[in-house]
Image (spheres, rainbow, N blue to C red):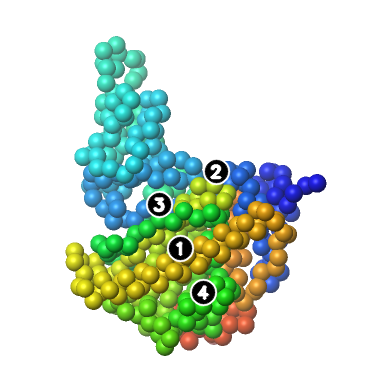
């Protein structure tokens, strides 16, 4: 008897395959993804190569590598990658010496502008050039030139508070990958947001679930009343709307954030210069594949996901704040107390998400029921996420990737949702452009 997880590997990489067909349909006819996508280790291995090996993957906070002399070690698509910064900018390299491939660094460290191989002491500058190869001048080797053996470069770029890396040179640039997200969230001025120097501002959770179940759970609010009864008091189901334009992301917004029953999210000082919609809303964006942004006017709960196996994921969580007293060397006592209330609230919500995602993983792995239908009103972002997953897994060349289009202006795509009472500025601009075009 064939188990629900047993699927020929070829199906995972063929765009016309029956395997992906139910996920490529419009949301009103689409189904959840197959159990193998979450529970099969062979699928996970293929995914590391075809999805994480070709996507722009969130790997670090920009402030972690803001100064020359700092080196970060990160994992991307099963490869170890080094990040450095010099006066000429940000750099990324494979963590492998050009002599015989030895790992150059085990963990984040200071390097004083020098990367040395621990094996035979080949010496590289922080921008990846080979500076010396000891004793190669003792018995000269014909044709050997230091300039030919610099570190293998990896594409890196930044947006807002984040550093991204991409192993595939054919992938679209990060600006195309993000689509309109930079314009959509421009008023927050994320480049200036920083973690607070407080206990609990960063934390990591080891979660017994597939990374995609965490993304899916974050992207939909169908589960909100039952899994998060306290969260539902400040992020009510009736106040949720989609928040997505063209780009490799899916999102939702709570507009307005409610403070009548709980005001946990409203205690910290808000960023200045926000559009009136930003100032009243919570933005929840799943940036494909592994970055989750929960943005409030006063703070961001940022999560980057590091898949370790089909059923295991590390969540690296950070609280970020706009410029102000929360990012100073010693936030006032009242703000430290407010942060602790906010921190506990988020961690409680995340604990609830971890519990239900681990339960979903067990059901998929041990039960493996056939996929069910998506709920159009609540799970359209999942449909969008599933299509992006299918594209990265099946495209022969990622240069052919089509970045998803955004929702149309108004509520035409929102399946029963009323129009957002405070539309984001980009959607107001899109609506005005649409009206002007149709009347001309």
Q: Which of marks 4 and 2 is nearer the N terminus?
A: 2
- Residue 179 lies, with reference to residue 253, above or below; the image says above
Q: Earlier in the sequence, mark 1 or mark 2?
A: 2
Q: Which of marks 3 and 1 is nearer the N terminus?
A: 3
Residue with the mark numbered 3: 59
Mark 4 or mark 3, whichever is nearer to me: 4
**SS at badge 1:** strand
Q: Where is residue 138 in the image (x, y as percent from the top left)?
A: 26, 13
How far apart are the two marked residues, 4 and 1, measured between alpha carbons? 18 Å
Assess disc 2: are there few (<14), some (14-19) or many (≥20) residues with their C-alpha within 10 Å of its C-alpha: some
How far apart are the two marked residues, 3 and 1, measured between alpha carbons? 12 Å
Q: Residue at x 59, y 61 (%)?
A: 359
Residue with the mark numbered 2: 49
Mark 1 or mark 2, whichever is nearer to me: 1
Assess disc 4: are there few (<14), some (14-19) or many (≥20) residues with their C-alpha within 10 Å of its C-alpha: some
In this orientation, does residue 342 appear? yes
């Amino acid at each position: 008897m064939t188990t629900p997880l047993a699927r020929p590997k070829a199906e995972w990489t063929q765009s016309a395959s029956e395997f992906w067909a139910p996920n490529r349909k419009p949301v009103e006819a689409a189904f959840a993804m197959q159990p193998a996508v979450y529970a099969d280790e062979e699928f996970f291995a293929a995914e590391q190569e075809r999805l994480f090996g070709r996507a722009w993957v969130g790997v670090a906070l920009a402030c972690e590598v803001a100064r020359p002399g700092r080196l970060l070690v990160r994992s991307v698509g099963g490869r170890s990658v080094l990040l450095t910064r010099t006066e000429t900018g940000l750099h990324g390299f494979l963590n492998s010496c050009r002599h015989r491939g030895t790992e150059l660094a085990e963990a984040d460290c200071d390097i004083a502008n020098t990367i040395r191989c621990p094996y035979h002491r080949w010496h590289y500058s922080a921008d990846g050039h080979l500076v010396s190869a000891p004793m190669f001048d003792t018995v000269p080797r014909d044709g050997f030139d230091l300039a030919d053996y610099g570190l293998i470069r990896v594409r890196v770029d930044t947006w807002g508070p984040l550093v991204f890396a991409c192993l595939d040179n054919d992938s679209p640039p990060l600006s195309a990958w993000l689509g309109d997200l930079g314009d959509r969230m421009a008023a927050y001025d994320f480049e200036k947001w920083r973690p607070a120097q407080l206990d609990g501002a960063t934390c990591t959770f080891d979660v017994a679930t597939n990374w995609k179940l965490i993304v899916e759970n974050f992207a939909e609010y169908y589960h909100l009343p039952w899994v998060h009864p306290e969260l539902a008091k400040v992020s009510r189901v009736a106040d949720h709307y989609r928040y997505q334009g063209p780009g490799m992301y899916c999102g939702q917004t709570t507009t307005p954030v409610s403070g009548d029953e709980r005001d946990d999210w409203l205690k910290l000082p808000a960023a200045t210069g926000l559009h009136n919609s930003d100032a009243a809303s919570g933005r929840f964006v799943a940036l494909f594949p592994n970055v989750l942004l929960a943005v409030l006017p006063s703070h961001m709960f940022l999560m980057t996901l590091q898949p370790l196996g089909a059923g295991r994921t590390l969540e690296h969580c950070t609280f970020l704040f706009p410029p102000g007293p929360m990012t100073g060397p010693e936030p006032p006592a009242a703000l430290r107390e407010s942060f602790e209330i906010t921190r506990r609230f988020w961690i409680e919500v995340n604990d609830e998400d971890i519990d239900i995602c681990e339960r979903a993983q067990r059901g998929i792995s041990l039960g493996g029921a056939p996929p069910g239908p998506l709920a159009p009103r609540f799970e359209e972002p999942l449909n969008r996420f599933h299509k992006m997953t299918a594209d990265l897994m099946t495209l022969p060349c990622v240069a052919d990737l089509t970045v998803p289009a955004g929702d149309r202006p108004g509520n035409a795509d929102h399946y029963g949702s009323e129009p957002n009472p405070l539309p984001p500025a980009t959607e107001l601009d899109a609506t005005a452009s649409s009206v002007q075009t149709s009347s001309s």
